[in-house]
Amino acid sequence: MTPPAGLPVTVVVATRNRWPDLARSLPRHEAPVVVVDNASDDGSADRVAARFPDVRLSRLPANHGAVARNLGVLLAETPYVAFADDDSWWAPGALARAAEHFERYPRLALLAARMVVEPGHRDDPVSALMRESPLGREADLPGPSVLGFLACGAVVRRSAFLDAGGFDDVVFFRGEEERLALDLAALGWGLAYDDDLQAHHEPSVQRDTGGADALSARNDVLTAVMRRPWPVVARTVRDVARRGPAGRAGVAQAVPRVPRALRHRRRLPAHVESARCRLDGPPVPGPRLTPGAAGTRPA
């Protein structure tokens, strides 16, 4: 894991109890790495320290979910930061390509990559959604505009990420990308997809999917409360509740977090709300799709 000389990108990995995945993914990164450990109790942090002494390791005393990435960004000493999960990594040359885009396009805040699922080298369905984004392509961005992303396949301009407040502890985890994307756009930054920028994801066998649909539903409601007009919030609650038991559970789980969401409430500028509305569409059959990458992403 020898970073190319002068590569202005740091990879930030937030992890919890995933040592086998880290052991496979960390050697693949072509940039300095910051690992933020979310209070693992399986010895992951000690093993990272012992096996990967070049990795900058930060140990959190409690699980902070997606907010742990914020600390990683603060610790990064480069102008650009690439996120990765403990079970994902960036393709050779991808981060150098991303850095070139950021340097060429000064309004670019976030670059979303094509996510390839392993084994099998299959495109994640979200890649097609971003590639075909209905938001079109702006002249000062390197690809189709998006209003969302998958965190493990995104590179950010560090200063823009910090200006937008990073990830928040209202949603905590799962679907945490949308509010950040909206806030970046509200600040005038651009978000784009690059089909030639590639990241790989090999889903961990330690993945805990219990309650994931309810958690996604909860966070759809909370994100709407924080940023969308009240009629949209009401429609979101209605639509989420119609998803069945998981949706109703998500609405119930959102209720105790609503006061915190209200403290963070800030309406989007009209042009961003208009763009976001363009991404809303009729229900899609099959696996539920929620606002995310180009507007929708598999939950």
Image (spheres, grey):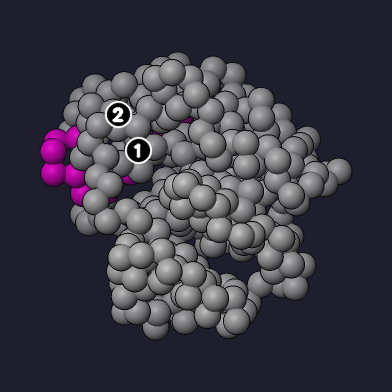
Three-letter residue code for mark 1: Val
Q: Work out whether residue 281 or residue 33 is closer to the camera in this orientation and state it.
A: 281
Write down the residue under mark 2.
Answer: 22
Local packing at callout 2 (Cα closer than 10 Å; few below 14, some 14-19, many 20+) is many
Image quarter for residue 174? bottom left
Quadrant for residue 92, please give it.
Answer: top right
Q: Between marks 1 and 2, how big is the CA–CA gap?
A: 10 Å
Residue 34 in the magenta stretch? The answer is yes
Compare marks 1 and 2 and give the one earlier in the sequence.
2
Mark 1 or mark 2, whichever is nearer to me: 2
Label 1 with label 2: CB-CB less than 8 Å: yes
**Residue 283, position as x, y percentages in the image:** 56, 58
Magenta residues span 31-44
On the image, the x and y values in percent for residue 11 come to 47, 34
Identify the mark at residue 35; answer none if there is no mark: 1
Q: Nearer the viewer, residue 159 or 274?
A: 274
> Which amino acid is tagged 2?
Leu
Residue 107 as seen in the image, left or right of residue 43: right
